[in-house]
């Protein structure tokens, strides 16, 4: 596998992504405290596909029904397991707003068996581990997950984890570089 860090598709400017996609990227960068995110300016080259993806992604995060803390823990675990630094660092920052502190981040890296997780958090993270590793959940993990999640939330968790696995593949394959933080 290549270790190149040169972007395979560079983030587009206004001319490459279109005025609407560029404005969306700028706005989302302002909200997250960065320059327009490279992820959005790279994906924005696909124009309408970018906006369709953004609509879907936003229904999972930040507008999903799972609590934001749960969502951020799951995203961080997927990013860690997929070794996706871009995604991990971005969600460490976003996770702070959702109550994910530095100790939580260390436990995310350690995994679902680390001390300090609630039974619910342990079940969510164990599910993420199995989904990333096997693309499926064994019956015991499913039963444990359903103790904590109703049907709708279970469906959302599956879509969220699958989406962030896909996103990690996109970011890693295209060698998308970290975003620069805006000056305070």
Image (cartoon, rainbow, N blue to C red):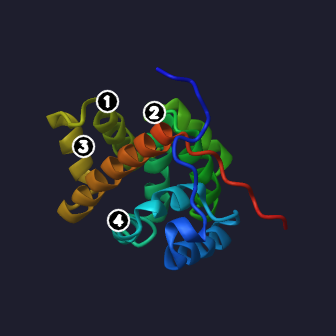
Say whether disc 4 or disc 3 marks the residue closer to the N-terminus.
Answer: 4
Foreground label between 2 and 3? 2
Residue on which disc 1 sits: 133
Are discs 2 and 4 less than 8 Å apart at CB?
no
Residue toward you, 162 or 18:
18
Q: Is residue 100 visible?
A: no
Mark 4 residue element: helix
Residue under label 2: 81
Q: Position of residue 34 (x, y in %)?
A: 69, 63
Q: Quadrant of residue 148?
A: bottom left
Which mark sits nearer the N-terminus, 2 or 4?
Answer: 4
For the residues labelled 2 and 3, say whether their Cβ atoms are less than 8 Å apart. no
Separation of marks 1 and 4 at Cα, in angstroms: 28 Å
- Residue 48, position in %: x, y? 36, 70
Res. 153 visible in picture: yes
Residue wearing tag 3? 144
How far is the residue under mark 2 from the one under mark 4? 27 Å
């Amino acid at each position: 596998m290549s270790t190149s860090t040169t972007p395979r598709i560079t983030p587009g400017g206004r001319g490459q992504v279109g005025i609407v996609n560029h404005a969306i990227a700028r706005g989302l960068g302002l909200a997250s405290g960065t320059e327009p995110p490279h992820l959005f300016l790279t994906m924005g080259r696909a124009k309408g596909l970018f906006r369709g993806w953004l609509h879907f992604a936003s229904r999972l995060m930040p507008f999903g029904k799972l609590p934001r803390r749960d969502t951020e823990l799951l995203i961080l675990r997927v990013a860690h397991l997929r070794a996706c630094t871009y995604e991990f660092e971005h969600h460490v920052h976003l996770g702070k707003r959702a109550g994910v502190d530095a100790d939580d981040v260390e436990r995310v890296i350690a995994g679902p068996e680390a001390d300090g997780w609630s039974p619910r958090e342990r079940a969510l993270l164990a599910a993420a581990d199995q989904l990333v590793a096997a693309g499926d959940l064994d019956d015991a993990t499913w039963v444990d997950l359903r103790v904590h999640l109703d049907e709708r939330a279970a469906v959302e968790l599956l879509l969220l984890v699958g989406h962030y696995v896909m996103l990690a593949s996109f970011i890693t394959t295209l060698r998308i570089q970290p975003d620069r933080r805006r000056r305070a």
